[in-house]
Image: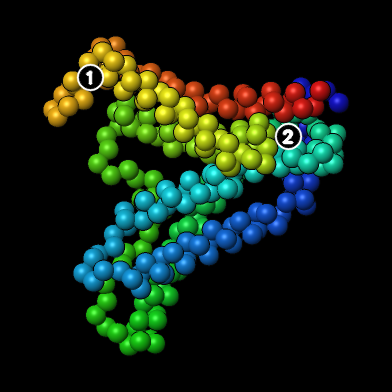
Amino acid sequence: MNANLISSQRLKNLFRYEWAIDKRFYLLGTIGIFMISFGVFLTIWFNNIEGFVWRTVDYNSIFFGGFVFLSVFGISQSFIDLRVKSTSIRYLTLPASAMEKFLVQVFLRLVLPLIIYPIVFWLGANLSVDVYYFIQHSLLEKTALTEVSKVEVLYLYWIPNSTIDIGYWILFGLIISIPVLMFMGGVVFGKWNFIVTPSVVAGFLLMMFGSYFGLSFILNASAFGAGGNYSIRVDDPEIFEGVPLFILICLILTWFAVFLPFVVTYFKLKEREV
C-alpha cells in the first residue's frame, strides 16, 4: 500500500471501524447534549424573571458555553485509541495511511460534532419552550406567561454589535481555535488533554498580556494610575490605516492557532507510526 495515496475503500473501512468501536461515545454524546440543553432551558423558563422577554439572540451566551464544553470534553477525545498500548498497536497497524486516519479523525471528532451540536442544541432548546408552555397552560392552567422566543439556528452564530473588521476576524479565529487546539491535544497530550491544553493556552495568554503590562509598568509605572495611558500602546504604531501592529500580531497568532494544529496533529500521527 502506498501511504501517500488516499483510497475511498480504505476511508470507508476506517469509518466503519470508528463507528463499530466508538458508536456508544457518539450516541451518548449526542443524547447528552440534547438532554443538557433541554434541562438547562426548562430550568431557566421556570425561574425566569417576570417581565423579561427572552429573545432569539439571548440564546447565544449559553450556546457558546456549550460550544466550549463540547470542545474541552468531546472534541478533546480525538485519537482515543492511541491512549492505551493495546488499542494503540491495533490502530496504528490498521491498513490505512496516516493521511487517511487523520482525515477520518478530523471529520468524526472535529467537523461532525460542530455540525451536530447546533442542531441538537436547537432541538433541545425549542422543545423546552413547547414543554414549558404545555405545563403552564394545560397542567397549571396559567395564562399570563413570560414571552419566550424560540431559537433560530442562524442567530446562534450572530455576534451582537460587531462589524466585519480586523477585530471581528480575531474574535472569529479565537472561537474556531478552541476546538482545533483541543483536537490537536488529543494526539499530543493524550488522556490529560482536557486539562493540559486549556492550561497551556491560558499560560500563553497570561505570558503574552503579562509581558505587555509588565513592560508598560517598567517603562512608566505612573501610567497605571487613574486616567493613565499605558507606555506601550496597542493603537500605535499602525501598519495599515486603522490596523495597529499589536492587533495585526494578535490576528496572525490567532490564525496560526487555527491552521498550525492540523499540521502538528498529522506529523505527530506519522511519528507514532514509525
- Three-letter amino acid code of the residue under disc 2: Lys
Query: In the image, which is nearer the foreground, mark 2 or mark 1?
Result: 1
From where the camera sits, is residue 262 visible? Answer: yes
Label placed on residue 201: none
Q: Quadrant of residue 146?
A: bottom left
Residue drawn at the location 39% of the way across and 87% of the way down? 139
Please tell me whether residue 170 is drawn above or below residue 53 in the rendered image.
above
Q: Quadrant of residue 81?
A: top right
Q: How many marks?
A: 2
Q: Quadrant of residue 101?
A: top right
Image quarter (top left, top right, bottom left or bottom right) of the C terminus = top right
Nearer-N-terminus badge (2/1): 2
Q: Which residue is mark 1?
A: 221
Q: Closest to the observer: 115 or 37? A: 37
Residue 93 in percent (x, y) is at: 85, 34
Mark-to-mark CA distance, 2 and 1: 53 Å
Q: Closest to the observer: 259 or 250? A: 250
Q: Which residue is mark 2?
A: 101
Q: Secondary structure at mark 2?
A: helix
Q: Closest to the observer: 87 or 31? A: 87
Q: Secondary structure at mark 1?
A: helix
- Three-letter amino acid code of the residue under disc 1: Ala
Residue 144 in percent (x, y) is at: 24, 80
Q: Closest to the observer: 73 or 37? A: 73
Residue drawn at the location 80% of the way across and 27% of the way down? 273
Structural crowding at the residue carrying mark 2, measured as other residues with C-alpha within 10 Å and reported as few (<14), some (14–19) or many (≥20) = many
Image quarter (top left, top right, bottom left or bottom right) of the N terminus = top right
Residue 122 in percent (x, y) is at: 45, 59
Residue drawn at the location 73% of the way across and 51% of the way down? 22
Residue 10 in percent (x, y) is at: 79, 36
